[in-house]
Image (cartoon, rainbow, N blue to C red):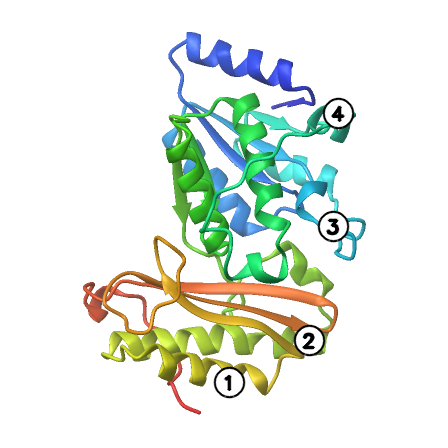
Amino acid sequence: MIIIDSPKAMRDWSLQQRAKGNSVGCVPTMGALHDGHLSLVKASVESCDATILTLFVNPAQFAPHEDFDQYPRTFESDCAKCQAAGVDVIYAPKASSMYPEHYATYVEVERLQEGLCGITRPHFFRGVATVVTKLFNATLPDKAFFGLKDGQQFTVIKRMARDLDMGIEVVGLPTVREADGLAMSSRNQYLSVEERTRALCISKALFAAEAAMAQGETNAKTILHAVKTTLAKDVDEIDYVSLVDGNEMTPVTTINGPVMLAVAAQLGNTRLIDNIRFEPNIPASVKPAREGSLSC
């Protein structure tokens, strides 16, 4: 495994792989790697000849009051995990090469970035779309792998790659969860023991809603009310609970196609997000079993 920190050197390496006829997979991350990230690496290693994992804490997606300075940085541990997982290259660019002096160019994906996290974090998706474009331009992948826990982010990036003719297959993989259901996140380490226990209400509320939808509940108002009621017992603040079209990220009132039920909530100083995707024409028998019931 090698570590590359310049865009030109990264492009040169990827071009060499392509010249050999090798396919290239890319796993973009901000580091502080956990099993969710490693599931993406595993998928890339299994389906591509060469795998690049990017490590870059992107300042463009943090507002001044957010946790850029506190975001966990565990470079040596991340490198060891990548080595063990079969990563060929870690691309860890310097901030000065990503955003040189007088930087002035940004990428935006209209409509898809406006709801959900885009309401309280209006800067976020411009920063994400821009940095991912730059990472794609340096790594030149055939496939790029993202977790579906960041459901809106995945949808934004997939649409961006399509609309800009990037020629990259953007692959979304299921959320990896702890044994008790909490979605894995680098920010989970911010939680106190008590906050970590309370955070379980998020996945429990989502699983209960998923079970209700599988049993035929189609009224968005009913589903949202039950989820909000469950969350209100344990979280400190609800940022949003939204049921949206799975492709367009626009709110729905009735479930008649693929949807995403998404939550963002605050526990102490930590903001957590989670979601489930639901396809009504897939029989409940083929969906993973979840515990819980939809009630107020």
Residue at 62 percent across and 49 percent down: it is 124
When the figure is inspected, residue 82 is found, relative to residue 203, above or below; the finding is: above
Q: Which residue has dot 4 on it?
A: 100
**Quarter holding residue 23:** top left
Specify the amino acid type for callout 1: Thr
Q: Nearer the observer, disc 2 or disc 1? A: 1
Q: Which residue has dot 3 on it?
A: 72
Q: Which mark is residue 195?
A: 2
Q: Earlier in the sequence, mark 2 or mark 1?
A: 2
Q: Mark 3 touching mark 2, by CB under 8 A?
A: no
Secondary structure at badge 1 equals helix
When the figure is inspected, residue 68 is found, relative to residue 24, above or below; the finding is: below
Specify the amino acid type for callout 2: Glu
Q: Residues within 10 Å of mark 2 (few under 14, many from 20)?
A: some
Residue 107: percent from the left, percent from the top? Answer: 55, 36
Secondary structure at badge 2 equals helix
Q: CA distance from mark 2 to mark 1?
A: 16 Å
